[in-house]
Amino acid sequence: MQGKRPVYSYPCPNPRLVGLQHHLLFRIWDVSQKTFYLRNNQLVAGYLQASNMALEEKIDVVPISPFNNTMFMGIQGGSRCLACVKPGNQPVLQLEEINIADLARAGDQAKRFAFIKSHPGPTFRFESAAYPGWFLCTSQEDQPVGLTNHTQDPITTDFYFEKD
């Protein structure tokens, strides 16, 4: 059968799991130049001087879906992940001790760890997949990173986000 090439077929991976094996490391800081760091076991946004820049937490990102920019976000090598939970009337952001690579097996429970990245100009916003309309935010003070449903000052929801 000259002229014919063999046809190979490869199993197509589940598109929801594409990229879960590949952590991407990013730097994140808000438009006021506050970077993320840990203080008293909480993720805080604040001003770090040159001598303290080693405290900056890099963000481990695992893309979930390239079609809608959905991702899991973690710190410390992906061993602790950002999660949106609703203990009361409104959702809050917390760090949870879970490996970012294990979120693929968490099923519907993984939704609280998912964020949708949007690009409203030169900056990015990160919306909770579990709680639409709630965005990652920082305040004017050196306070824990949180969630808000307001996207104007004094709450900052716009971030610079670049691959490290």
Image (cartoon, grey):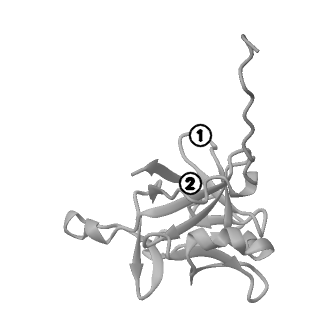
Residue 59, image x, y percentages: 47, 63
Labelled pair 1, 2 in contact (Cβ < 8 Å) = yes
Instruction: Quickly name the residue at label 2.
Output: 158
Tag 2 secondary structure: loop
Report crowding for label 1: few under 14, some 14 to 19, many 20 or more residues within 10 A (C-alpha): few
Figure check: 161 above or below 56: above
Q: What residue type is labelled 1?
A: Gly
Report crowding for label 2: few under 14, some 14 to 19, many 20 or more residues within 10 A (C-alpha): many
Instruction: Quickly name the residue at label 1.
Output: 121
**Residue 151 visible to an observer of this rendering:** no
Q: Which mark is residue 60?
A: none
Q: Which amino acid does label 2 sit on?
A: Asp
Instruction: Calculate the distance from the C-alpha at mark 1 to the C-alpha at mark 2.
Output: 9 Å
Query: Considering only order in the chain, which callout, 2 or 1, is on the residue closer to the N terminus?
Result: 1
For this view, does 159 lie left or right of residue 93? Answer: left
For this view, does 99 lie left or right of residue 114? Answer: left
- The residue lying at 75 percent from left, 38 percent from top is 9
Question: Which residue is farthest left?
Answer: 51
Figure check: 141 above or below 16: below
- The residue lying at 51 percent from left, 59 percent from top is 23
